[in-house]
Amino acid sequence: MSIESVNPLNGEVVRTYQPYPAELVTRKIRQSHQAFLSWKNTSFSDRAFCMTRMSDILRKRKHELAKLMAVEMGKPIKAGEGEIEKCALVCEYYAKNAEEFLARETVPSSAARSYITFNPLGVVLAIMPWNFPFWQTFRFLAPGLMAGNCCLLKHASNVPGCAIATEEIIKEAGFPDHVFQTLLVESSAVEKIIENPVIKAVTLTGSTEAGMKVAQKAASLIKKVVLELGGSDPYLVLKDADVPLAAATCAESRLINSGQSCIAAKRFIVVKEVAEEFIRLFKEEMQSKNMGNPLDEATTLGPMAKKELRDQLHEQVTRSIDQGAECILGGEISPGSHAFYPPTILINVKKGMPAYEEEMFGPVASVITVSDEEEAIQVANDTSFGLGSAVFTTDIERGEEIAASRLNSGCSFVNDYVKSTPELPFGGVNQSGFGRELGTYGIKEFVNIKTVYIK
C-alpha cells in the first residue's frame, strides 16, 4: 500500500511514496546503532557545531519548508515560516546549553566522591504527528542528538515530504551518516520496529489512543516512553478579566493551525457576569479570520489536514447540537473537494456533550458558562485530559495561585495562551501523557541517570 501526500486545499495527490520494505527498515535500524557507537563519544562542541549549522539551514530554507507544509497539511505560509524559525531557535538553545544541562552533578554522600552522570541511551524511535511536522520533530531531535542519542523518525503518513526534508537538513548540516533517519512506513509497522532490541526508547506525540498502544508495547519490552497526547485545554475567564484581551487571546489560541493543536484552547469556561460580553467579542474575533489558500500570505486560516478529520469534527459538532448546544457561528461545510471547516462557536455546552467531553481537533470553540470562580475551576478539571490551561484575571496574584495550584495540567498560563518554548518543560498529565520535552527536563528523558560512587 502506497503512502500519499494529498493537498487538503483541493484533494489532489501531490506525490505517492512506496513504504520501505521490512528488510530496509531493519538495515536502517542497524545503521543507526552503528552510528550511535561513534556519535555517543563525540564532544559537545562537535555536536553543537552541527546543530548551529542546522539552525542556519532552517532559516535559509524557511520559505521552501513552509510551502511544503502548506501543500501537505494546509498550514498558512506565514505560520509555517514561524514554525521553522522556532525549530532554528530550539537547535540554537540546545547547542548552547546541552553541555551544561548534562554536566556531572557532584552529590555529597558517605563516599570519598560520588556524582551523577548523564549518558545517552542509544537509538530512540520518534513517532510524530502531522500538525506541526517540523516543530514536533525538532523539539525532540535537538536535545536527543545533543545528548548523544541517534534517532529514527516515523512521521505521520500524510507528511512524507516533511519527513524526507528533515533527513536532508540533518545531512546538509554535517551530522554523521545515519545519526538521524526517516522511516517511510505505515503505522502497522511500528510495533515490529519497537520490538527491535536496538531501539532503546520511544517518544510519541499524537492521539491518546495511539499513545496507549505504543506505551503498552514498549512497557511489555521494558523500554522508556515519553508521550505527548491529546488535550481539551480549559481557558477560564473570571469576572474581573480584561474581557477584550481574553476574547482576542482565546480566539487566537483556538485557531492556531486551524484549531489542530493539542494545546489550542478548546473549552472556554466563562463566569456569568462577563459571559455576554465575552461571547460577543469572541465571535467578532473568530469571524474576522481570513480563511483561504494557505499559500496566500493574507490567509490566517487554512484547510484542515484531511477531509476525514474535518468530517469527524463536524460529526462531533452535530452531535453536540442534537444534545442541546447552540451554534452561533460556523458549523457548516461548503461544497467541494477541500478540507475547510469554518471558525465555529458552540454555546450552552453542558456535561455529556461531545463538545464538553471530547477533544475537538479543529476550529471549534466550546463556551461553558458558570456561576463563579469555584465552578470554573471544577469544570476545568472535569476532564480526562491534562495538557494545558489558562486563566484570565486582572488579579495577577490570584491568577498565579489558580494556575500554579488549582488547575490539573502540565502547564498553565495567566492572561496568555498556552505555547511551547525551548526553555520550559512541556508535557501533560492524565490522558494527555507523561514525561517532558524541552528545557532541562526534556534533554534528561532519554539519558541514563547514573550514580558513580568511589569509596
Image (cartoon, rainbow, N blue to C red):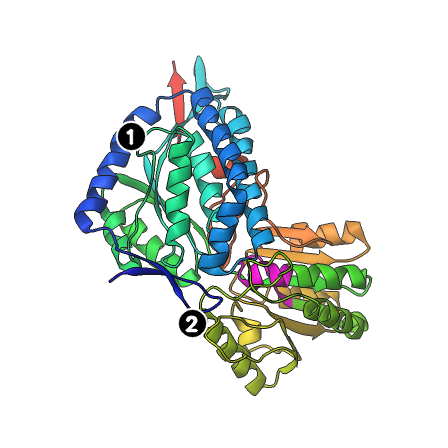
In what element is the residue under mark 1? helix
Where does residue 441 sit, x and y in percent of width and height? 51, 38
Ranked by sequence position, the earlier of labels 2 and 1 is 1
- Quarter that holds the N terminus: bottom left
Quadrant containing the C terminus is top left
* Residue at the (24%, 40%) spot, across then down: 28
User: Amino acid type of disc 2?
Assistant: Glu
Q: Is residue 222 left or right of residue 323?
A: left
Tag 2 near tag 1, CB within 8 Å? no
Q: Which residue is mark 2?
A: 308
The mark tally for this picture is 2
The residue drawn where x is 44% and y is 14% is: 113
- 86 and 77: which is toward the camera: 77
x, y (%) of residue 10? Answer: 46, 69
Instruction: Find residue 169 and name its label.
Output: none
Give the labeled residue for mark 1: 35
Tell me where residue 351 sits by quadrant. bottom right
Q: Position of residue 261 (x, y in %)?
A: 54, 59
Residue 262 sits inside the magenta stretch: yes
Q: Which residues are magenta?
A: 253-267
Give amino acid for label 1.
Answer: Ala
Label 2 vs label 1: CA separation? 39 Å
Assess whether residue 331 is covered by the magenta stretch: no
